[in-house]
Image (cartoon, grey):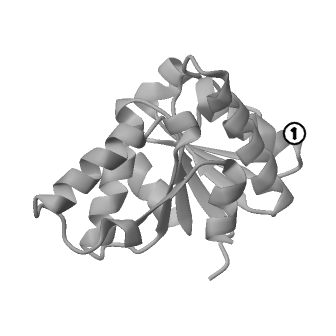
Amino acid sequence: MKCTRIAVFCGSKAGDNPLYSAHAHTLGALLAEKKITLIYGGGRKGLMGTVADAVMTNGGEVIGVIPELLIDWEHQHEGITDLRVVTDMHVRKKMMYELSDAAIVLPGGNGTLDELFEMLTWNTLAIHDVKIVLLNSDGFYTHLILHIEKMAEQGFLYGNWQERLLVCNTPQEAIDALV
């Protein structure tokens, strides 16, 4: 299946490592180059804004989904193709999942982890079945990957987690894993 719409989950802050922003920018440019629509959280700050700006600058399409609560917090992006304002976080995540063929998870905070684990859970429960790529920029997710391995070793996961979550180290690897 060719991916035409990819959800990107990432921080509304840029983080302290410049590689995170560089990877977000490169990923956005690659999405536009491959004519893949970006589905993301609708903010203009942090890594979210960087990836959306890169897609738009390179002639791609962007659909942002932002809950009313976060309009001021994440500063809604008004320079994208389509901004959808929804009632809450649950509606946001559900809409993003429904709009996307796959997902790439960049560095981020609690919200990013929430989105990652909800998608993994939904794949496990067969609510949906989309490929999920974890972009391990400069080892950002290495400890999390080790923890997931520990959960599997201790018998807490159903099936092989590596079939549900692909780990890549560069934006190009992430795109190549999905197209």
Q: Quadrant of the N terminus?
A: bottom right
Q: Note whether residue 91 is visible.
A: no
Q: Position of residue 115 (x, y in %)?
A: 38, 47
Q: Position of residue 45 (x, y in %)?
A: 62, 23
Q: Nearer the viewer, residue 84 or 38?
A: 38
Q: Position of residue 94 (x, y in %)?
A: 39, 57
Q: At x 51% / y 31%, what residue is drawn?
A: 11
Q: Note whether residue 70 is visible.
A: yes
Please tell me in which quadrant of the rendered image residue 80 appears. top right
Disc 1 marks a residue whose amino acid type is: Thr
Q: At x 31% / y 51%, what residue is drawn?
A: 117
Q: At x 35% / y 48%, what residue is drawn?
A: 145
Q: Which residue is mark 1?
A: 57
In-image side of 34 versus 65 (left or right): right
Q: Is residue 74 above or below residue 119?
A: above
In-image side of 114 versus 104 (left or right): left
Q: Nearer the viewer, residue 171 or 114?
A: 171
Please tell me in which quadrant of the rendered image residue 155 appears. bottom left
Q: Secondary structure at mark 1?
A: helix
Q: Position of residue 43 (x, y in %)?
A: 59, 31
